[in-house]
Amino acid sequence: MDPHVPPVFCGLSTEGPCEPDALPRELDRFVSAGCTAAEISLQNGFTVCGGRVKAQEVEAIGRVLARFTLRYTMHGPLGLNLMDADHHDRHVAVARAFIEVTAALGAAVLIVHGGVWPKGLAAVEFERRRALEVEALQRLGDEAGRRGVTLALENLPPISSIPETHDAWGIAAQLERVAHPQVGATLDLGHAAMTARTRQQNLAASVRAMAPHVVHVHVQDQFGHPDGIRVPGHGEALAFGVADLHAPPGWGDVPLADLLALVPLREGSVLIYELAPKFFRFIPETVAALRELAHRVSGTLPVRVGSLS
């Protein structure tokens, strides 16, 4: 490996229960397929209870993770919303707890979702909620820094369960206001494609807007169409090419290599492919494609299994 090129770690996100019995089965499959990283879906477990860390559960998960030679990142709760003015203190408390869990499990990155707000919000109220998110991220960034963790604010998709959320420019603007070394962005390429198509934006320009802030990358394929067609099952969503599919690479039309080439990879960069559980039969092909993608965009071979220190 060229010592002048930052190593790239490639992996998948866990999608099943984040519990001591289930988690090893997923991680075994990941390692067997050639992963050198894994994103642990903490939201699927019990490490935080009522805004407080459940130490016994953290220790149990930690023992599982220690069995594998992987670079870990952590995903926080899907419902975390630092623009929820009515329950803001609770969201902040939960975020603090997940920062503590992330540090205890030896991970350096915690993915947190960008703000969500109701449609038709008055401009004054919208700005107040934006300020709430900025101030919370600044305080949480201080906490994260003390624990050696970086927060990574993720761009969300325009789907029916999310009334309004930041686009790429909105994420970048928030992070510029936060201006904290421990707070960056998670760029989800599929979400970016869906938002660009829905809002008639230039996809490459949106990725460039977020690129200076990116500390973590979610890779996934889809067609960029929102879930506006009634489809009874996952197979039909795929047939119609709608919804946030998280399909294997090459199944959709997101130009993954072209978009990744716009993002500067830092030392120790982690590329996580978020593959929906219904596609887990295709884990080997997905990991092979992700490793090839990393090679194409970084100019070097990705870190290999067994080479982590």
Image (tube, helix red, strand yellow):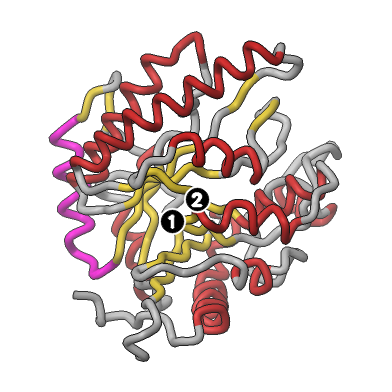
Residue appearing at x 73%, y 64% in the figure: 254
For the record, the magenta segment spans: 54-70
* Secondary structure of the residue carrying numbered label 1: strand
Image location of residue 58, percent across then percent down = 19, 40
Q: Is residue 217 above or below residue 171?
A: below
Please state which amino acid type lies under the numbered disc 1.
Val
Q: Which residue is mark 2?
A: 186
Residue assigned mark 1: 215
Q: Is residue 17 visible?
A: no
User: Which image quadrant: the C terminus?
Assistant: bottom left
Q: In the image, 273: left or right of 46?
A: right
Residue 19's quadrant in the figure? top left
Residue 223 in view of the camera: yes
The answer for how far apart the CA atoms under marks 2 and 1 are is: 6 Å
Question: Observer-nearest residue: 2 or 278?
Answer: 2
Is residue 78 on the magenta stretch? Answer: no
Is residue 19 toward the left or the right of residue 281 in the image? left
> In the image, is 37 to the left or to the right of 221?
left
Whether residues under marks 2 and 1 lie with C-beta atoms below 8 angstroms apart, the answer is yes
